[in-house]
Image (spheres, rainbow, N blue to C red):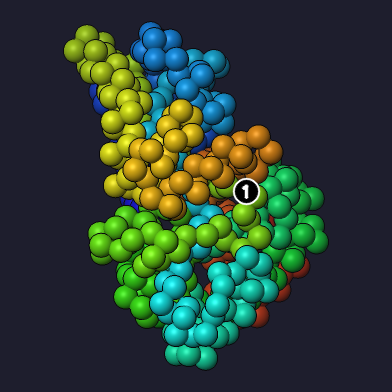
Amino acid sequence: MPSQVAVRHAMTVLKSRAVAGNPPGVAQIKGPDIQEWASTGLLDTDALKSVAKDEKWDSLLDKKVSDTVKYEGDYVAVPVNIHRVNWLWINPEVFKKAGITKNPTTLEEFYAAGDKLKAAGFIPLAHGGQPWQDSTVFEAVVLSVMGADGYKKALVDLDNAALTGPEMVKSLTELKKVATYMDVDGKGQDWNLEAGKVINGKAGMQIMGDWAKSEWTAAKKVAGKDYECVAFPGTDKAFTYNIDSLAVFKVKDKGTQAGQQDIAKVVLGENFQKVFSINKGSIPVRNDMLKEMDKLGFDSCAQTAAKDFLADAKTGGLQPSMAHNMATNLAVQGAFFDVVTNYINDPKADPADTAKKLGAAIKAAK
């Protein structure tokens, strides 16, 4: 995962190129930013029409996926893959050494596991203290406490009553407790270095999206044996998602236009979807593939993610990740990051006061 500074720098470069009339054929843009770019008229609403029709994208993709990459009914981007964000990664050998006999399914069980890990000399929760990582944990806790509907009201709809109300205060109270189990040496650490502590048996758990699986795979570890991936406690009926997408820009060069269509066909093709997702830790965007993950050779983590994605799509449990550019624009996301990170790092911070600050900061950033 690139840092937010790197993301903003890349966006600045992209904007300067696009405004100067020299955009790339495609660029990685995610979530609501796709709609913002499309509203400027810089994205091509015609380039993907024939491909989308021929390849039956409307029936191939879940509506939440297709809506993410459409602007006023037309495809302006190609969805690459789906990441589940609300995962808890566990080293079962460390759990065993600490005397923990089952994976936590509630916050109370999570705290109990954290206490046992601490007592046994392990880092309970590997965590790099960067703002986006803090907010990844924050949104998982909000989802656990407030449920998918409450999460949507607060972190997607930005409803002030939800942002400042008693359930948000409770979420922040729980977040403060979760933070007591975080790696004391994690300040400023990249997520993959923290993942390494779980892989190497120094830590018991990590809250991180499914890109973390690539680190386990690189270490030759096997899902379900060397590591466990479970929904963050209290969020098993919900799925916070992050969709990587390639936006298509208006270009005059016929060769580039043909290239845009070729990329779209390849990216949505079964072979690319399988190979890319297996290596990145994500799951395919195609519903037909999500229904037969075991036959396609995906591991137990990916199979669970696919099953939950399809189930949660029907119940409202499928929600865009605020921490990963899927629910809001960058200004609002930045306001969340500032308030959440300041709160986690201030021992005297009060949950009720912080909820008020959150409401004020989001209102100002809108």
Q: Is residue 191 above or below residue 28?
A: below
- Residue sitting nearer the eye, 194 or 158: 194
Please tell me which residue is depicted at 66% across the width and 67% down the height of the picture: 106
Give x and y (percent) for residue 201: 36, 78
**Mark 1 surroundings: few (<14), some (14-19) or many (≥20) residues within 10 A:** many
- Residue sitting nearer the eye, 162 or 205: 205
Give x and y (percent) for residue 34: 46, 30
Give x and y (percent) for residue 125: 48, 74
Name the side, left or right, on which 186 lies relative to 108: left
Give x and y (percent) for residue 254: 22, 9
The image quarter containing residue 114 is bottom right
| Residue furthest out toward the left | 255
The image quarter containing residue 292 is top left
- Residue sitting nearer the eye, 308 or 364: 308
Name the side, left or right, on which 151 lies relative to 218: right
Please tell me which residue is depicted at 52% across the width and 60% down the height of the picture: 230
Q: Amino acid at mark 1?
A: Ala
Q: Does any portion of residue 221 appear in the rendered image?
A: yes
Secondary structure category for the residue under label 1: loop
Q: Is residue 112 above or below residue 8?
A: below
Please tell me which residue is depicted at 35% across the width and 38% down the height of the picture: 296
Please tell me which residue is depicted at 69% across the width and 38% down the height of the picture: 315
| Residue furthest out toward the front | 295
The C terminus: image quadrant: top right
Residue highlighted by disc 1: 238
